[in-house]
Image (spheres, helix red, strand yellow):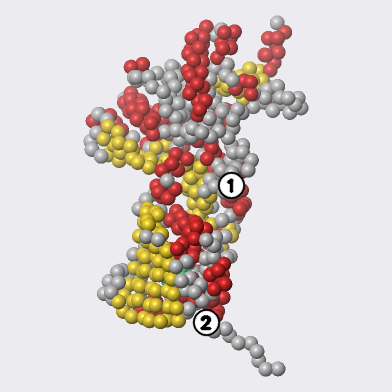
Amino acid sequence: MADIIELLPDHVANQIAAGEVVQRPASVVKELLENSIDAGATYIKLVIKDAGKTLVQVIDDGMGMSVTDARLCFERHATSKIRSADDLFGIHTKGFRGEALASIGAIAHVELQTKTDGKELGTTIIMEGSEVKSQEASVVPKGTAISVKHLFFNIPARRNFLKSDTVELRHVIDEFHRVALAHPNVAFSMWHNGTEMFSTPSSNFRQRIVNLFGFKMNEKLVPVNEATELVDIDGFVLKPEFSKKGKNDQYFFVNDRFIKSPYLHHAVKSAFEGLIKDGYQPGYFLKFKVDPKSIDINIHPTKTEIKFDDEHSLYALIRAAVKHSLGQYNVAPVLDFDRDSQLDTPYNYKDKPVTWPTVEVDRNFNPFQEETKYRSSGFTNFKSKQKESWESLYVDLELEPKGDAESAVIGIEQDFKHSKIFGEDDTEVQIKTYQIFTKYVITALKSGMLIIDQNRAHQRILYEEYLKQLTTKASVSQQLLFPLTLEFTRKEFSVLDTIKEDLAHAGLLYSSVSDSKIEVTGVPIGVPESEVLTIIEDLISDVTQEIPDTNFGTHDMVSKSLSKSLAIKTGQSLSALEQEDLVNRLFACKEPSLSPFNKPIFITMALGDIEKQFKL
Ligand code: ADP
Ligand code: MG
């Protein structure tokens, strides 16, 4: 029998490869944008017509290509990004297969203009179905512009397979978002049929998200930051009340590459357990930095799935980091009620005009309805609730010195009703916590009962957290979208300067604009912008008072002052979850029994003592 095996001609092989790499206009968009990123572009412009079916053009100001490279880039397996198989295990670029341009060149009309830095002339090449139609030297700007026209012109079946412009445009926007989110430091713009759809300057991650998804997104974001040996996690989750029934905004990036991972999605979702309803999806924008050697990107041509060496640890770390952030957000002080009288501050609050504290929350959505009154949701009822809290606070203060247990009952919070102390099911005496007098959190122990002062407990928690941050210099800060300009007297300003470094480690980042004005660009996580001024004022006065006492380290001083300012106050009602979180975090502290100001945080009542009382 005669030999029948033949090598396929290049253009056929390329067409076959294209079937894998290029499914639709959005695939072209992805490949071209990523090439521009790899070329070190600082500005990338995407222009499409008819959802990319007629034209996809990407213009960048990257490194460009030499005359030879410009011709070679359309060959299959032609790449400048890896040289040997070993390089596959340390990939730092988006591309590495050398397949994209060859594939695109096989199924569209492509025009490439490119010029490297310092050269007078660049190159223009026109390709049609893997054939070079023309190549000439030409006057073009530095960088690369690639136009891909009439996609699938030679494969009608594929062309007919494309969906409506609306659907294809959505895919294009998705790809654009993914690349733009992965590289906030690169400026992008996107045009469709002559209209500018997006324009995003070089910025930080938070600003990039807001630029792409609208200003409303800003208040939904909860920062997540965790640096570990295995992975650095950085980004945001959406507050639980912004979870959605269908698919939400869900973005994972590994080493600046967008990826999909049902497994890691599960990790995030499980961190939201109990905070969102069944069937709802959390939203997130999370970036992971890992050692390139610990991942394998080489699984799928479109490269949105990757393999991790240590997936299980990654799962645990992500889950813990998200939980941690949500925890911080839940107990974040959002109301500024009266201060604990025992921690006299030199500021005379009575002289300040009384205003309702402002709370940054979603006003419409309450996933918890009656059961858990999340501070951040159910705002519609919140004002009256606030009032109740004020009133009960007032009652408490009046009653407290008398210690009159009978009349103090008035101050008992509604939460009492919801507590499960006498659970419906006797076998499961699942005693958690409940709050009384909007001041104490009570929890049962095997051997008795614990009454915890919420303000002091939270002071202790925050104090230890800040002290740790300040000594390890590992700060977490929440970037402000717009810097906050604050004015001080020269004297206050100079005091502030002495603790600038400590403040930075506590998350408060600022720069001086003049000798009395500062611009705050970052605040400790969970601190509302409206409170920043008061906190700094308190700090300055605390530091001024402490300065004569040279034994005091500034770490200690700053941590104390911040914990005092930011701790949840007496009079603030806490949801069941917040109470539980408070108790858990308190007992994770090194010194859970004393506040940073050496006041007792809780008292215990032993079961034996309680029983004795009943025998009287
Ligand atoms: P890969 O990105 O996997 O290397 P491509 O087919 O996408 O494969 O690109 C082939 C080569 O063409 C790249 O390795 C790069 O050297 C060059 N190239 C592609 N696009 C650009 C660009 N926008 N700027 C500079 N060089 C580019
Ligand atoms: Mg590429």
Residue marked by disc 2: 10
Q: Does the residue labelled 2 lie within 8 Å of ligand 1?
A: no
Foreground disc of the pair 1, 2: 1
375 with respect to 352 (left or right): right
- Image quadrant holding the N terminus, namely bottom right
Q: Is mark 1 on a helix, strand or loop?
A: loop
Measuring 53% from the left and 45% from the top, which residue is drawn there?
283
Looking at the picture, how far across and down is residue 30, in whole percent? 47, 63
Q: In the rendered image of this protein, does residue 279 appear above or below residue 546? A: below
Q: In the rendered image of this protein, does residue 202 appear above or below residue 334? A: below
Q: Quadrant of residue 477?
A: top left
Q: In the rendered image of this protein, does residue 588 appear above or below residue 269? A: above
- Image quadrant holding the C terminus, namely top right
Q: Is mark 2 on a helix, strand or loop?
A: helix
Looking at the rendered structure, which numbered label has been put on residue 493? none
Amino acid type shown at disc 2:
Asp
Measuring 43% from the left and 56% from the top, which residue is drawn there?
180
Q: Quadrant of residue 489?
A: top left
Q: How crowded is mark 2: few (under 14 residues within 10 Å), some or many (20 or more)?
A: some
Q: In which quarter of the image is residue 410?
A: top right
Residue 277 in view in this figure: yes
Residue lying at the far bottom in this picture: please name it: 2
Residue 301 in view in this figure: no
Looking at the picture, how far across and down is residue 222, in whole percent? 48, 41
Q: Report how far apart the C-alphas of labels 1 and 2 lie in the structure.
A: 44 Å
Residue marked by disc 1: 246
Q: Which of marks 1 and 2 is nearer the N terminus?
A: 2
Amino acid type shown at disc 1:
Gly
